[in-house]
Amino acid sequence: MNNNKVFYKGDNNLVHKLTFGLPGSGISSIIKKEIINVVNNTKDDNIVVIDVYGTQFNEIIQKFGGVTITAKELLGCFDKIVFEPLEISNYKNYDETFNIIVAILEDLGSDYIYPTQQSILYETLDDMWKSSEENTISNFIQHLQEKDNKLASILEVLNVFSNSENSQDIMNKLNTRFVCFDFGDCRKEFKSLAYLLALKTAKDKIWKNGEKQIYTCLFAQIDNAILSEGICNYLLCLYKRMRQHWGISSLYAAKFSTFTNNHILTGLLNNTNEFIFLKQNHDDIDKLTLYFNMPDTYSHFLEYADAGQGIWTDGRQFGFVDYTSRLNNN
């Protein structure tokens, strides 16, 4: 396996990739090297990074002319990200905005959104579309209060995220080839929302680039602590559709059980072409051995692997990987 190639080029065109590695396994350095490969070995391919805990990619962002968008900046663009599609649509298609709102409601602790409530949300979006009012979360909540005060009260916390004065300048950053969403400054209770907005913004960038036949590679950290059911559903939907729009992903997480313990994230496993496993704990090795029917030789190696060492699989074949030389050349 050539560790210096762009992973989605050549025979493996439009590959989705998942990398797993516990702290100390070298996973952060390996993802950085993968990003650098894309920057150095492609001309126009775009890169979007979602860094949940922040600051991991500052050095390469500065070195390669990328831009950082913080959670605070992203949340300050809430109305533009969520409601702008209503302003540019000349027909009644609210699916994108509706899906985001449902995901937010589930993230904020709402129970299952029943069909009657879904109809109310659509009616409220229709009211906004027909009105001459500005499309903002505040106006949406006001319209919703007349139909379902319970749902409206759940969303009231979002009133603080009206567009900031420089929201358009922040959105313009997205035209840069290399964009990193850095959530290091984000309060814990808002990280899930910021993650959802980053996914939505990444989707818009992928779709726009796809119209020009430009690849966009999404590098995103997966952490169960900030993923609600609604966000998982949105991520899975994006994961399934993005290849049709020249989008590729390299997702990464600490433990394999992050996915096997979540019935929605299991869908990501089913739609992934290539897996890298670095150091894992014993329970996770048992789970991935069972999931992939992995030979014992690889299972034993993984339990005692040094930093940068692991295994590769496409679900049928297996092989050893050794990134130690790349770790030493940071």
Image (tube, rainbow, N blue to C red):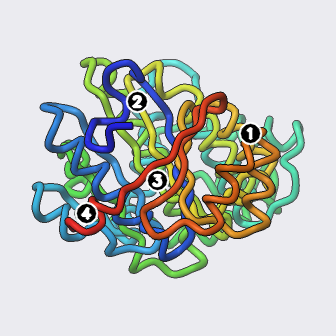
- Disc 2 or 1, which lies upstream in sequence? 2
87 relative position to 34: left or right: right
Q: Are marks 4 and 1 in contact (CB under 8 Å)?
A: no
What x and y, as percent, mark residue 302? 62, 60
Q: Please identify, in this view, whether the residue under mark 2 or under mark 1 is nearer the observer.
A: 1
What x and y, as percent, mark residue 133? 47, 45
Marks 1 and 3 sit apart, C-alpha to C-alpha, by 23 Å
Marks 4 and 1 sit apart, C-alpha to C-alpha, by 37 Å
Disc 4 residue type (three-letter): Thr
Which residue in the protein does label 2 denote? 247
Q: Do the residues labelled 2 and 4 touch (CB within 8 Å)?
A: no
Q: Nearer the viewer, residue 280 or 88?
A: 280
Marks 4 and 3 sit apart, C-alpha to C-alpha, by 14 Å
Q: Is mark 1 on a helix, strand or loop?
A: helix
Q: Do the residues labelled 4 and 3 touch (CB within 8 Å)?
A: no
List the single residue furthest toward the front.
297
Which residue in the protein does label 4 denote? 68
195 relative position to 156: left or right: left
Q: Is mark 2 on a helix, strand or loop?
A: strand
Q: Is mark 4 on a helix, strand or loop?
A: strand
Q: Nearer the viewer, residue 104 or 39?
A: 39
Q: Please identify, in this view, whether the residue under mark 4 or under mark 1 is nearer the observer.
A: 1
Q: Is residue 75 visible?
A: no
